Amino acid sequence: MKVAFYDAKAYDREAFEKAVEGTELELVFYDFRLSEETASTASGASAVCAFVNDQLDRACLKALVGQGVKMLAMRCAGFNNLDLDSAKELGLSVVRVPAYSPHAVAEHTLALLMTLNRKVHRSYNRVREQNFSLNGLVGFDLNEKTVGILGTGKIGRVTAGIFQGFNCKVIAHDAYPNHQWADDTGVRYTTLQDLLTQSDIVSLHLPLTDDTYHILDADTIPRMKQGVYLVNTSRGKLIESEALIQALKSGHLGGVALDVYEEEEGIFFEDKSGTILQDDKLARLMTFPNVLITAHQAFLTREALAEIARVTLANVENFRDEKPPLEGTSL
Ligand code: NAI
C-alpha cells in the first residue's frame, strides 16, 4: 500500500523511514503542501499523510478521492486546516495523533522561559564577539515565583510539574478542572481573572477554540501583573498580536516567549532568509529585546517524531488490514 506524504521535511522523512522498516508500506515524500492544486500527485496512493499547513478543504479532499485515496492520516494533533465534515461525507477515513510527547512541548516552554529570563540568547551572541560585559543581562530567580498555567491538559500538567521542581507556586485555570491532580500536586485552581492578576509568569496550554480565540487581548492583557513573563507554546490565535505589541511598547510585559504566532501559516517551518518579511506585526515583535520567538518547534524531539511515525503507520496498517484505528486517534 502506497502512502503519499506532503509538506515533508528531512526530520519527518528520517522518523518515518525508520518506522516503516518491517512493514510492507511504500512511502513517497513530497516537500510541497497538499492542496487542490497538488492533489493529483496522490495518484496511486491509497492513503495520504498531511500536516498542519496542508489545505485540506473540500475541493482538495474531492480531488484526493478522485485519485483513489481512501484514508487521510494527520501527523499532528490539531486539525483546524481540515474540512472534517466534507471528509466524512466523501467517505474518507481520517486519523490523527492526539498525543505524542507532552514532555517535548513542556520542556520547550521552560527552555524559552529560561533563555528569555536569563538572557542566554543575548549572552551567546555577545561572547562570540568577545564582549564579556554583563550589563543588561539581569534576570530573576524562579524560586518562589507564582506561575499561572492556563489549561491543565496533558501538556499543562507536565509543565506545572517542571515549574514545581523550580520551587514555584503553581496556580491554574481550566474550563474542566482536574481536581484529583490538583489535590495530588498542591496546584490551586482559580479564575482566569485571579490567575492573570496573581502570576509572575503565565504559560498557555489551551487548544484553539471559539472560546479561547484571543483569550489574551486588549482587555485581558492589561489585567496581568506589571512585568509579567508570558509564554505561548499552544496556538498563535490565543493572543491578539496587536494588543501584545501595545503592552510591550508600554513596558507592561516583562518578557514574551512565543513558539506560535497568529499568522504563522506560510512563514513558520519555512526558510524565508533572503526574502522580504511581509508581516508587519511579526516584524515588530522581532524587534523587542524582551521577545523570544521560535518557529513552532516545541514538538520537535526525537521521541515525539518517533511516536508520531509509529502511531500514524500503525493506523495505516490497521486500515489496510480492515482493523479499527488505535484508540482515540479516529476523527
Ligand atoms: P489537552 O486537550 O490535553 O488540554 C487542553 C486543556 O485545555 C484541557 O484541560 C481543557 O479542559 C482546557 N480548555 C479547553 N478550553 C478551555 C477554555 N475555554 N478555558 C479554559 N480551559 C480550557 O491538550 P494538550 O495536549 O495539553 O495541548 C495543549 C495545546 O498545545 C494545544 O493547543 C495544542 O495545539 C498545543 N500544541 C503545541 C505544539 C507545539 O509544537 N507548539 C505541539 C503539540 C500541541
Image (cartoon, rainbow, N blue to C red):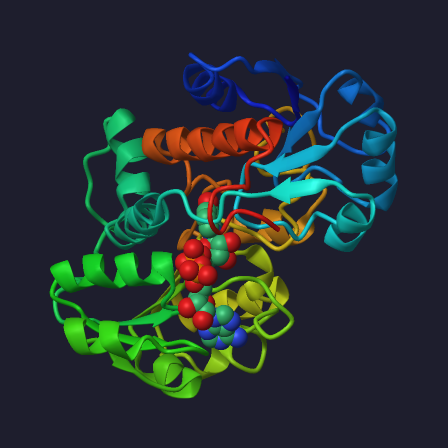
Q: Residue at x 24, y 30 (%)?
A: 127
Closest to the observer, 311 or 319: 319
Q: Where is residue 136? Give x, y as percent.
A: 27, 52
The quarter of the picture where residue 163 lies is bottom left
Closest to the observer, 263 or 326: 326
Say if residue 232 shows up in the picture.
Answer: no
Q: Residue at x 54, y 53 (%)?
A: 285
Q: Residue at x 51, y 18 (%)?
A: 13
Figure quadrant of the N terminus = top right
Q: Where is residue 42? Give x, y as percent.
A: 76, 21
Q: Is residue 208 above or below residue 292?
A: below
Q: Is residue 90 above or below residue 285?
A: above
Say if residue 135 shows up in the picture.
Answer: yes
Q: Is residue 12 above or below residue 285?
A: above
Label total for image = 0
Q: Residue at x 34, y 29 (%)?
A: 302
Q: Is residue 254 left or right of residue 296?
A: left
The quarter of the picture where residue 236 lies is bottom right
Q: Is residue 60 left or right of residue 214?
A: right
Closest to the observer, 201 or 156: 156
Q: Is residue 280 left or right of residue 239?
A: right
Q: Is residue 106 left or right of residue 186?
A: right
Q: Is residue 165 above or below residue 37?
A: below
Q: Where is residue 88? Give x, y as percent.
A: 76, 49
